[in-house]
Image (cartoon, rainbow, N blue to C red):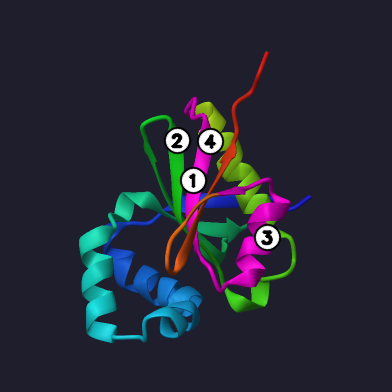
């Protein structure tokens, strides 16, 4: 059994977080919009708060990060980034299962996320976890999945 821990990111580590997010998103952003480093850095600083980020760790080793927040009756997942050497080993599924449990603990009805339309690997991953496409935009699919426990 894989044991993952989510560790809160301190504000002082946001430059490292940006670099991790960049590694995980640059290829998709480049395809969709072209990469503009200054724009991406400014957007990141403007759009995300450090308290939304958690390092994903196995024992004490960082293997990636998640960024999520709760609003209304849902958890919204902004990012799930696994470092390349930890991909395709089940860590993403375990991280998502933990997020689903956390969403239930917060009495959320579900989890929402957006995914680049051209990112077939990510779309397939989320669909395997029960996510459904709720809306299509020019570059993104908005997906969601229920986590409600029915009695």
**In the rendered structure, which disc, 1 or 3, sits on the residue that comes first in sequence?**
1
Read off the residue under disc 2: 74
**In the rendered structure, which disc, 1 or 2, sits on the residue that comes first in sequence?**
2
Residue 118 pos. (x, y %): 56, 74
Kindly give the residue lying farthest to the top in the view shown: 151
Quadrant location of the C terminus in the rendered image: top right
**Alpha-carbon distance for marks 3 and 4?**
17 Å
- Label 3 with label 4: CB-CB less than 8 Å: no
Read off the residue under disc 1: 112
Question: Which residue occupies the foreground of this view, 34 or 89?
Answer: 34
Residue 92 in sight here: no
Residue 26 pos. (x, y %): 44, 81
Magenta segment boundaries in residue numbering: 106-133
Q: Is residue 105 left or right of residue 85?
A: left
- Label 4 with label 2: CB-CB less than 8 Å: yes
Q: Dot 4: what SS? A: strand
Read off the residue under disc 4: 110
Task: Classify 10 Å Cα crowding around label 3: few (below 14), some (14-19), many (20 and above).
Answer: few
Q: Dot 1: what SS? A: strand
The vertical placement of 57 against 103, above or below, is: below
Residue found 57% across the figure and 59% down from its top: 57
Residue 116 pos. (x, y %): 50, 68
Task: Classify 10 Å Cα crowding around label 1: few (below 14), some (14-19), many (20 and above).
Answer: many
Read off the residue under disc 3: 125
**In the rendered structure, which disc, 3 or 4, sits on the residue that comes first in sequence?**
4
The quadrant in which residue 58 appears is bottom right
């Amino acid at each position: 059994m894989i044991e993952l821990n989510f560790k809160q990111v301190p504000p002082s580590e946001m430059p490292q977080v940006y670099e991790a997010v960049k590694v995980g998103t640059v290829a998709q952003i480049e395809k969709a919009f072209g990469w503009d480093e200054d724009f991406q850095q400014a957007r990141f600083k403007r759009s995300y708060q450090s308290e939304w980020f958690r390092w994903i760790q196995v024992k004490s080793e960082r293997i990636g990060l998640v960024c999520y927040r709760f609003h209304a009756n849902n958890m919204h997942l902004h990012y799930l980034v696994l470092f390349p050497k930890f991909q395709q080993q089940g860590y993403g599924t375990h991280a998502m299962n933990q997020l689903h449990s956390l969403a239930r603990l917060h009495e959320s009805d579900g989890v929402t996320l957006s995914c680049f339309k051209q990112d077939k690997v990510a779309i397939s991953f989320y669909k395997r976890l029960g996510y459904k496409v709720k809306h299509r935009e020019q570059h993104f699919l908005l997906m969601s999945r229920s986590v409600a426990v029915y009695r």
